[in-house]
Image (cartoon, helix red, strand yellow):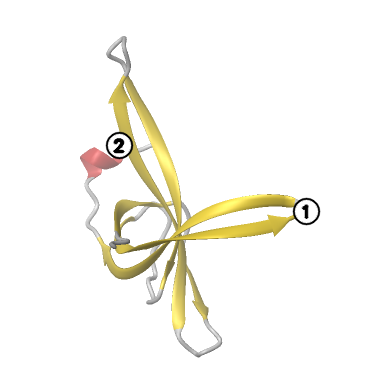
Amino acid sequence: MINKVTLVGRLGSDTEIREAKNNKFYTKLNLATTSGYYDQQKKWIEQTDWHSITAWWKLEAKKGETVYVEGEINYNEEKKAFIKAYMVKAISGAKTKTESNSEADEKLPF
């Protein structure tokens, strides 16, 4: 069985570096990825998906920067105010901040 995900996207906010109880550091980040398709009228429809990521390494990055992560998908169930919420989190084991491409940057919605 394989549980692997690779994401390249833009940060929706600055990264949050935290310390776990075992004195190891981890980073919380929100990553946006964009894909799209042509509808029947041949109009480009763009869709942005947001990913909540916990990375077991330190990454200091600012909102809008492009980031590459690899890891596994983890499903969590949270109960708040009598509502069940199912969350999909990517747990990352690899990291890279990528260089900005100004031409591509202009087309992104965030």
Specify the quadrant of the image occupied by residue 48.
top left
Q: Residue furthest right?
A: 81
Give the residue at x 36% y 67%. Answer: 92
User: Which quadrant: the C terminus?
Assistant: top left
Residue 66 position, x and y percent, is: 31, 54
Q: Tell me if residue 102 comes above or below residue 98 in the rendering.
A: above
Label 2 Cα crowd, 10 Å radius (few <14 / some 14-19 / many 20+) = few
Q: Which residue is mark 2?
A: 106
What secondary structure is found at the residue carrying circle 1? loop
| Amino acid on which the number 2 mark rests in the picture | Glu
Mark sitting earlier along the chain (2/1): 1
Residue 79 falls in which quadrant of the image? bottom right
Q: Residue at x 22, y 47 (%)?
A: 101
Toward the viewer: 22 or 82? Answer: 82
Question: Can I make out residue 110 in this image?
Answer: no
Instruction: Tell me the CA gap for discs 2 and 1.
Output: 40 Å
| Numbered disc 2: secondary structure | loop
Q: Which residue shows up at 29% across the image and 26% down it?
A: 37
Name the residue that disc number 1 marks.
81
Q: What x and y, as percent, mark residue 71? A: 33, 65
On screen, residue 54 versus residue 84, left or right, reads left
Can you tell which mark lies on residue 40?
none
Estimate how packed mark 1 is, as few (under 14), some (14 to 19) or many (20 or more) residues with alpha carbons within 10 Å: few
Camera-nearest label, 2 or 1 = 1
Note whether 94 is above or below 89 in the view shown.
below
Amino acid, disc 1: Ala
Quadrant in the picture for residue 58:
bottom left
Residue 94: percent from left, percent from top: 28, 69
